[in-house]
Amino acid sequence: MAFRAWLLVFFLGVELSTFVFQCSESKYIKYNTTSTIVPGKLNVHLVPHSHDDVGWLKTIDQYYLGTNNTIQGACVQDVLDSMVPALLADRNRKFIFVEQAINAFLSLMLLLIDCFFVLILQAFFQRWWNEQSEEIQSIVKKLISSGQLELINGGYCMHDEATSHYIDMIDQTTLGHRYIKEQFNVTPRIGWQIDPFGHSAVQAYLFGAEVGFDSLFFARIDYQDRAKRKNEKSLEVIWRGSKSFGSSAQIFAGAFPENYEPPSDFYFEVNDDSHDSPIVQDNINLFDYNVPQRVNEFVAAAVKQANITRTNHIMWTMGTDFKYQYAHTWFKQMDKFIHYVNQDGRVNALYSTPSIYTDAKHAAREAWPIKTDDYFPYADREHAYWTGFFTSRPALKVYVRVMSAYYLAARQLEFFKGRNKSGPNTDSLADAIAIANHHDGVTGTEKQHVAYDYALRLAIGYKEAENVVAESLAVIANLISKTGWSPQTKFHQANKKNSLFYTIPFLFQCPLLNISYCPPSEVDLSNGKNLVIVVYNPLGWTRKDVIRIPVINENVAVWDSSGKEVESQLLPLLDVSVGVRKYHVKAYLGKSPKTMPSYWLAFSATVPPLGFSTYIVSSSKSADATSVRQDYKSESRKDGTIQVGPGKLKLIYSGNQGNLAQYINSKSLVKESVQQSYLYYRGDEGNQTVNPQASGAYVFRPNGTYPIKSDNKASFSVFRGPLLDEVHQRINSWIYQITRVYKEKEHVEVEFLVGPIPFGDKIGKEVVTQITTTLKNNKTFYTDSSGRDFIERIRDYRKDWDLEVNEPIAGNYYPINLGIYLKDNRNELSVLVDRSVGGSSIRDGQLELMLHRRLIRDDSRGVGEALNETVCISKKCRGLTIVGKYYLRIDPLGEGARWRRSFGQEIYSPLLVAFTEQDGHDWTKLHLPTFHGMAPSYNLPENVAIITLQELEDGKVLFRLAHLYEVGEDKDLSVMTCVELKKVFPNKKIKKITETSLSANQERTEMERKRLVWKVEGSAEEEEPKVVRGGPVDPAKLVVNLSPMEIRTFVIDFSY
């Protein structure tokens, strides 16, 4: 709107006679800060805040305590200590705090009690809160109740939006929101994602509308996008992030004009020389009296922002990273500005919060532009695309993903056993995962010592959760009573001097199986012992998969719990895997493995939904195992072609070069030329005379493309068997690849080993794999949004503005958490991933994934370190080696979604495998060999997943169901579906079921009742959603209906 009234009276050179005082001595001035919103004036909402990263340049503990200040002067407890008296000094002052429940204290002693770790976990806010007296706690509660102190966003951290999976985002938000509700009876209203490096569509509709937020604010959008939005006054929009839900899940969203700091010259942290802003000097008897000047500067800055903003309300974010350590310095200056600016009268300044600002925007009844899709990729200037962090620290990324899946399964098993209030639980792992999903955690944009800290917390959380899993499986299998948990072992004892590794529980697990290390499976079975394997399925449908474990015996067979021999296969453990195993076991555990397996044993396992099956591995001398097991065969490179695959899917390789040439599926009738290759981009080092931007932890800036060619003498071997075929390829001295084709599956599994990336040439390298086909996708491809919706991408194009292309590779990279695909009028090529990576389609018919990065320069975004990860033994270090997987499939057009969704869920939630020994008795007769968590004949619909099943501290159960398909994604599965709770919980009676918001901090009906309705540009009527959501749950029938992409959250009371 036009602000004629106050623009007419704005003159930079105006003489403020109001401020000319005829006095000869100093006197007390009571500043009037009582201002509220004034209709008809430009209202400047001053929002005091401190952005407190939970790890970045310093660890979480160091940030809380204010230690290690040679790196960064930051102390969160000082911020909170100083905030309380500053707010008490003037009831008109306000402050917002975001990171509610972040671990900030790792006890120097890990207490070993009853054979499990107790990790002393506190929080930025939680820890500070617990340290306060009852008097201070009472004061803080009153500050929150009065609105002076507002808790916004409310999660454990400000999670990332590119590299975090949506399930992790839900879990960490729920932890924070439920704590705030329990402690203060508050439900946060505002999303405040001011620092993540780009913003996902899932953030808008799931972690905006579906948690009950009224608005969402952020800072980092592309510099070209920002410039256009300033001109169009469209920084603030109605964001419809979901194609399926449309207007029913929209949210008011605002991007700040620059970033989340105050306007230039309005920065007041004490003893901080990085910003030198003049204070308001209002003592006329002293030199440098500047009230008229500072008021003019305030009004000028306000008018400048008003000219790019709709309505007569603008927000100033008064704070930045770790500020308000001496809050009085900020509030004293804001008091003066409010007092003198309002006396001047051209604009109105007031203490405010994002909630007050949102309500003011809503009350204006303005029609807002619509925003769809997301805000990726993000560039803050020319040649500076923040697309490198999509892949940075790939080991940490997969560690977070593996722990996330383990946490999901561990909570399920904890529910079946019953939560143990005095014993181990999953809380420590929950906290560690929440922290690691911080936007400078899983992103890989932290200093190296901070990355170690995140990994350490995950390891500690895992060790306690491992006991929960072992105890739960033992209780369910009738190994022990529910009240008597006594871990024991028939395997070697861990080194008790190492505080991270203690007595191995009876049902042992193998967290280092990815590097071929699994002590319980590496036992000698030739002496008559049998290995018992319990396989748990965390998904809601029956699952058949191939289990692979390292073994030392060649003559072994596998039996199911009924005594029937199971088809199995031996594969060799080759030298490359042995080398990785030896080095990294020593590096991680501080000791070398005691045994060295020679083989991988693969066998087919069928496991019921939310249940387990038991398998026995024994020496084949005791039974005729050779009738179903085929030993591996090896083929060397030869002329002609080599066909690989024991089932419907065949891969054709050229015999003379060993290159993949063709993909043939006799079931779907797909026949497609396919090539797979490796290359690296040289990381730009920056040039001070041309452009100083270097490639680094955040920024991907390639300077040349270098194909990685296989030496003709490089190894190429094929190993065949009844379950799967493997193709082993030595690409070069630091890249090795195993391609697997399974008899019962119609996709390709590619396991890659990349590293150490050579560094002797002082060239930074960003390693990529490319899959090339003849598909004509016309520049169009699709990537997932935080593992959930798929979004259309078009090369060198942005829907919201005319893109000026200055980085044709980096500017077309997008984050991938689930997968990427392209299609033409015949087929679809899909690739799914095991962790967050960056990827793109740089040329038609081709997809590429960035697998690993090692760089020699910092990219000047604050970290101050090159991205050069190493693994050390006795102070001797070498570059990080990455072991990972991706999965490839080609389907007829319109048929790929079923695989992407169903198998994508299996990638996220792998089978959980635990081991023990059978010695002298029949395990299956003494223990429960098969467990059904749901009714034995019941499976969830194929398009639904259970993403949360968790017993809460009060005995109630948190239960979430997610529809896996978008509207129109699949002709059969993108439909309303239902889940029968009586069959999900066959042995329990549901006394009460309450549907809640996504973060389980308020009833869904109450959240919907409070939801603000916004006007949209060019739309007289609200756009109807494309799907109708599932209705209320009938307490008698107990059937939950879910529409496409719907996630429903419930708190359930059971009658025990």
Image (cartoon, rainbow, N blue to C red):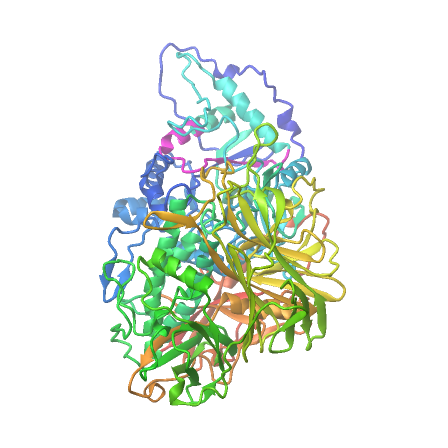
Total labels: the figure holds 0
Residue 280 position within the rendered picture, expressed as x and y whole percent measured from the top left = 44, 22
- Going by the picture, which residue comes out furthest to the right? 825
Is 322 contained in the magenta span? yes
Instruction: Please state if 106 lies on the left or on the right of 1032 as rendered.
Output: left
Is any atom of residue 418 visible in this view? Answer: no
- The segment highlighted magenta reads 308-334
Is any atom of residue 984 visible in this view? Answer: yes
**Residue nearest the observer in this picture, 28 or 45:** 45
Residue 350 position within the rendered picture, expressed as x and y whole percent measured from the top left = 49, 34
Q: Is residue 142 above or below residue 788?
A: above
Instruction: Please state if 338 lies on the left or on the right of 799 as rendered.
Output: left
Is 178 contained in the magenta span? no
> Going 53% across and 25% down the picture, which residue do you hit?
298
Quadrant of the drawing holding the N terminus: top right
Residue 581 position within the rendered picture, expressed as x and y whole percent measured from the top left = 40, 62
Q: Is residue 920 above or below residue 1035?
A: below
Task: Say which quarter of the image contains residue 700.
Answer: top right
Instruction: Please state if 427 lies on the left or on the right of 302 as rendered.
Output: left
**Residue nearest the observer in this picture, 584 or 632:** 632
**Residue nearest the observer in this picture, 718 or 446:** 718
Residue 221 position within the rendered picture, expressed as x and y whole percent measured from the top left = 59, 42
Q: Is residue 754 above or below residue 531?
A: above
Instruction: Please state if 344 lies on the left or on the right of 582 as rendered.
Output: right
Quadrant of the drawing holding the C terminus: bottom left
